Amino acid sequence: FMQRESEKKKIFFTLTLHSEHKLKMTHLSLQKWIELAAVSVSEEDYLERAASVALELTKTLRLEVGRNNKNCAQIKDGSETSVSCCYSNTNEGDIVDSDGDGDFMGLPPYADGDGSSFVPIQIEDIVADNVRISAAGVNLVATEVKIHPSSCKSYNDFFEPPQMLERDACFALGMILFKLFSRQDFSPLLDIKSVDENEIISFDDLSLMFEGDGLDFFEDSTPLPALKKSSQSSSDRTLATSSDKAMKAKGFLEEQGLPRSICKLVSDLLEAETGNHYQSVTALLSLGDAQYDLAQMRLHPQRFLHGDTCPEKALERTELLDQTDAKLFGRENEMNTLMSAASRVSTYVSDVGQNISNHALNPSMMVSDRGHDARIMQGNGFLCEAVFLSGHSGSGKSSVVKHLVSFCTARDWFVLQCNFDRKSAPLSTLLQSFNDFFEKLREALDHDTFDRISHSIITSANDESFCQLCEVLPNLCELFPFTQGRKKPNNPLRISLSNASQRNTEISSTVGVGSGNNRLNYLLNIIFKAICKGGHPVAIIMDDLQWSDAFTLEILLDLIEARCRSEFCFEGQTLQRGLFIVGGFRDNEVDSDGYLMNHIKRMEQLNVNVNILDIDEVGEHAINKMMSYKLCLPERYTQELAGLVHNKTQGNPLYMIEFLKSIIQSKLLTFSVKSRQWIWDEALIETQMISEGVVALLTRKLQQLPKDVIEALKVASCFGQINVSTIKLLDLEQFVPDLQNSLDLAVKEGILEKAGPIFAFSHDMLQESSYELIPLNERNFLHKTIAMSLARDPEIANDAELCTIAVDQLMICNDMSLLKPLERALFAKLNLVAGKNAMGASSYQQARGYFESGIRFLTKKAWDKQYFLCLELHEMSVVVSFMDGQVETVSSRLDVILANAKSFDDALKSRTLRAKFLASQAQYADATSEMLDVLSTLGETFPKDADLTFVTNEVNAAQQLLTNITKEKILSLPMIEDIRKLNAMKCMGLLVTFGYFSSPMLVSLLCCRMIKMTFEFGFCEDSISALAFVSYALIQYLNDSRLASRIVRIGEALMCNHPNEHALRAKLTAVATSARVYVQPFQAAADCVLKGYNSAR
């Protein structure tokens, strides 16, 4: 455009002056702006800046059309005197893009002036010469665009201004944009020719008018949109002055190499000229639609402005193959509710008066709710919000959840993500989410957060609790390396017993019915409280809750309830903490009165603000937005295709995505390199694509994959998610020669996702469809083959994860007829190992399932051929049933053990467990009789009818032993080494816990005997129990409250920092407090009671 060197030098000089005054605004005519921008920026940048100019100009025209029509109506009605016209454009913020998609809804109201007359913008003023641009900086970025009126004629009450038609403004805008983008005037390019209104015009006739200039348009693009006849009167019908201009302009712009988006926009605007009787359905008759198109170009220039020339790049831009960061459509209301709840939690969370994580939340998402704010402050510095997403499979719940995870993670939230799976134990999935959280936390942990979390854990957990936490959450130990030196205490359930096999077994007076679950709740409360104290808002985001269970949800509810009761303090200052719970579930797989809905109702009773959102099908309007975004075309070009997709898929998001993939694969939707856009034939899609449902579509899609990929997906569907290390252990000759490579191909197809070494299905319906490809009569055999392939690894017994995977596969198989006797024996052992591993992770319900499965694998003569395996499986089943609180099968399992035990030592544990079981059923006399019989066999007999004198003498003997006792003297005693006496001490320690209900005097005899044995044979854990109970006997029989009080204090000192401290406190607090109140006021014992209560929790 600038042919002479002198003019170039003048322009560069001007730009230099601008660079020295970057903050000053430059006011230019459109022609001057074009000349400056053409030489100061690249072609690509010119297009983007020109699109910004076009957007600002369109906004101005929308305002002026609205003002013009408003003022005309005011003058005609006589309701208001004339007003002054303001020519300045509205600010960018006046027209708000609420959802970031370029859809500017609503205009600012017209601001009336104070003058008595006004100078309106008329249609003849909307020409390129009257455009004035305010640009900032040397890059000429437009900040304001005005239309300068060419006429100064004023109008008042007596002279009505002519009304401006919006379609005329669209045509005028098209003329200006032609010059803006082509940098040439429009008028010299056209040779207008009139056509008789009665003459029949065909597409061929229209083509001949261009004398070959516009023929490429018909060859390269989609079929020309249908023409629609205008309702204009016949007196002004001329065709060539409208359609001819549009096509001529489009052909010229395409020859200049401009993007198709610009060519379409200008051509569609020019079709709006008055007198055009045949308009295509894509004609732009609304400035709002033009503004939307230009806003999309500015927001997404690579999509809607520059376009693609490479089919592979165009396919990648659809985000159909990789939907990790795919944009959501039709979920604005749901995301608004989620963001509002997240905003309330984030703004509530503060740390010593400072808001830590209020990171630029979208102001439009904030919700003001005075009633809710009042409700918040009723909690002790803790706010909890909960939103549950309900919908059928494929409705897009998981996509909403993923966007929320990204939102919270980007704003430094603590996010615990838990995706339940029908093939995994719910509790294990929950615990794994906590473990994964600490792994991610290790990578982005600041000093202050570390101090808060570590301080909370260290002050709440003793050595025993911390070591148990590290067993449940291994990554916790990695996060706090300074704690790795802590001595790991012995398992409180285990002591050595002398028997023929030298086995370890479990007898403990401190382990009661349901104690394992209570302990797990206590440990998770320690962890969750520490996480909440970290100074960041916390989000627990769960998906597929229909596959959770009542116990796991009960744990979550306990965590919430505990936080609602407690206050958060750090260094003496109260902190405000917040929790956001989000869950997704399939509404057709959850009963209205089932455990999930009942737990949600109970959350509301805990002062939690609960919302349940129904995730329904996506509407046709939202589908059109999606199609426009993915195909990088204006919405008016994709509207009919969107309607077709809606009719075929009924708005199911998963179905829509798979449908689009299908028509692309079938070449019904293709990217044309020549026309640089996606093209399709709606009629062909309508006839060839049958509405078959999402399951059938997925199945057909999978069946079209290579055979090796199909077989690999069948194997993967048996796992849910599969690790590369597991793949390497499979006998590939029985499956697919190159299983990992086949899975990689499935990732490229979008069926699987790969995160590190783990393959997982991108949607659970894809897993279900892949599994359905396995014939029913082959499924059990495939699971068995996988299990046997893994079980051949010689290190499987030492690999907890591998062992669990193998037994899980065989449990799914559940067909004993497929197993040989040796295979059944092998998996009985592996179930024992898997059950112990699950107990170590505090998954007692899962452990119970493994032990019971191991028992089912045993053969009829297993007690003869696999005696110790049978004995241990039955014993562990009883133990874990106690800890899980599920005692339905305890009695039958104990009967089997006692019927088959070969010695007293083998039966000892079971008899002890039976006594505990009888006591738990309030059968104290039978339980006492059972334990007295056991003690008699161990050499410790007690009179059945002991009188007061006998008991008093025994207590007096214990008093003599304890008169000068101190903590140091007791600790100087050797540890008991006689296994038989140690077992007797354990049995007596158990009997004193429930013997009081059947024989109170017997309890005194038992504790006196335990004191005597401690001094004679050595110290053990149950010696502490003996001190607590004997203190009460000293008061009851000898009235020696002073010695009793001192013995209680010694016992409490011995409990401190003991590996089994909490269990001992829970057991002994009541009797110890009873002894203390004889010499001290009850208030002095309050601290002891509180410690016992916390330990019992």
Image (tube, helix red, strand yellow):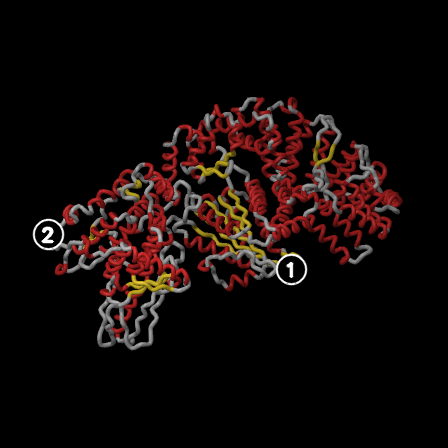
| Residue type of the residue flagged with mark 1 | Gln
Identify which residue is drawn at 36% across, 37% down: 697
Left or right of residue 647, residue 553 in this image: right
Nearest to N terminus: mark 2 or mark 1: 2
Label 2, secondary structure: give it. Answer: loop
- Left or right, 782 with respect to 949, comes to left
The quadrant of the picture occupied by the N terminus is bottom left
Residue named by callout 1: 573
Residue at which label 2 appears: 199
Q: Which mark is residue 75?
A: none
Residue sitting nearer the eye, 993 or 371 = 371
Q: Residue at x 54, y 28 (%)?
A: 790
Question: Considering depth in this image, is 19 or 132 the residue closer to the camera?
Answer: 19
Question: Whole-percent x and y of residue 710?
Answer: 42, 30
Tell whether label 1 touches label 2 (CB within 8 Å): no
Say whether residue 425 is left or right of residue 898: left
Q: Amino acid at mark 2?
A: Glu
Residue 905 vertical placement versus 508 (above, below):
above
Nearest to the observer: residue 369 or residue 507 = 369
Corner quadrant of residue 575: bottom right
Q: Position of residue 19 (x, y in %)?
A: 40, 60
Q: Residue at x 14, y 58 (%)?
A: 237
Q: Determine the CA span between mark 2 and mark 1.
A: 88 Å
Please, what secondary structure does the residue beneath circle 1 have? strand
Between 272 and 432, which is closer to the camera in this rendering? 272
Neighbours of disc 1 within 10 Å: few (<14), some (14-19), many (20+): few
Where does residue 572 sit, x and y in percent of width and height?
A: 67, 59
The residue carrying pointer 2 sits among few (fewer than 14), some (14 to 19) or many (20 or more) residues within 10 Å by Cα, namely few
Instruction: Tell whether 762 sits left or right of 683.
Output: right
> Can residue 949 be spotted in the picture?
no
Location of residue 560 in the rendering, given as x and y in whole percent from the top left corner: 58, 52
